[in-house]
Image (tube, rainbow, N blue to C red):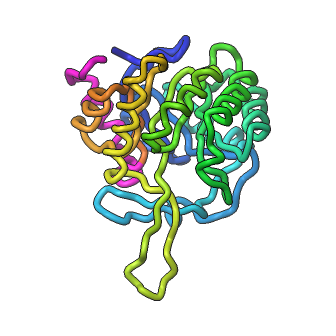
Amino acid sequence: MLMKLGAITLQNAVCLAAAPWDLAGEGYEQLGAIFTKTVTMEPRAGLPGDEGILQVADQTLLNRTDLRTEGAELLVQEHLPRLRRFGVPVFVSVTALGVPGFRKIARYLQREVGEQLAGLEVYITVPPGGSGADVTARFVREATEAVRNELRAEAAVIVKLPPWPDHIRGLALGAQEGGATALAATNTLKVLHLPADRAAAPLVGGLSGEALRPLAQRCVWELANDEQLTLPIFGTGGIFTLRDVQDYLRVGAQAVQVASGEWLSPGLSARLAAEVAHAALPTN
């Protein structure tokens, strides 16, 4: 069964997340949707993707904490038209330090390109210098509500949650109460990487890819089996094969987002979308 997001029905269960700004190639028109890299209202200085993302194991990436983040204005002026040319729904992933920040960026994007967007993805993460205790169900509800209230009624609001199996259900209920259209499980896991050079400083950041997959699938399963939650779910984390897509659907997702796989193997999401279009998929 294809995922419905308000007035939108995705044509395919495979979506591209953290889409490269210069996305090029064939087959992307078969995707269910394209999600942008996460942007902030103002750009944040840091390392570009090629330097800020490090392969630390087979099909596993470290996304460094000091990774550069583009601002909303550059997204509107340069990046969005390139991603929209494939003719599939485009969602902008946004994050902010607090509820007023989420409100501000949602208001700006609605004003500048609201009719061009399928909606926004609210990326919930621990703020710099903060802790997991700062990410509460109340915060998720208020951030979701702030974004929902700034967008046109037809726009979808997808809330991407941290990979915390013991707490994700409460956070998801906050998103649902705030007016979310769907959930995404999950974003990256905070980790530390020790370089081979013993004199080099440890690297900190977010883990993505294959090593994250079992944890993300557990989070999807937790959400799908909560009787109070009625929102559809995107599974995201370590999707490289048709079997990975099928496994996420098996544990309760209705669609998936491919990010690390596309970074490691450009065009993977388009190839998976083509495979999915001709495969028998689990239903839930």
Q: Is residue 125 found left or right of 129 in the rendered image?
A: left
Work out whether residue 147 or residue 117 is closer to the camera in this orientation and state it. 147
Tell me: residue 107, above or below residue 51. above
Q: Is residue 189 found left or right of 275 in the rendered image?
A: right
Q: Is residue 20 found left or right of 222 in the rendered image?
A: right
- Furthest toward the bottom, the residue is 199
Q: Is residue 243 magenta?
A: no
* Residue at image location 39% in from the left, 24% down from the top: 224
Give the extent of the magenta segment: 260-284
Hey, which quadrant is residue 91 in on the image?
A: top right
* Residue at image location 46% in from the left, 44% down from the top: 163
Work out whether residue 127 or residue 61 is closer to the camera in this orientation and state it. 127
Q: Position of residue 46 (x, y in %)?
A: 64, 64
Q: Quadrant of the N terminus?
A: top left
Number of marks drawn: 0
* Residue at image location 32% in from the left, 42% down from the top: 239
Q: Is residue 266 magenta?
A: yes
Q: Position of residue 162 (x, y in %)?
A: 51, 43
Q: Is residue 78 found left or right of 277 in the rendered image?
A: right
* Residue at image location 59% in from the left, 65% down from the top: 47
Q: Quadrant of the C terminus?
A: top left
Tell me: residue 172, above or below residue 264. above
**Residue 118 visible in the current orientation:** no
Q: Position of residue 132 (x, y in %)?
A: 59, 50
**Residue 37 visible in the current orientation:** yes
Hey, which quadrant is residue 254 in on the image?
A: top left
Q: Main secondary structure of the magenta part?
A: helix
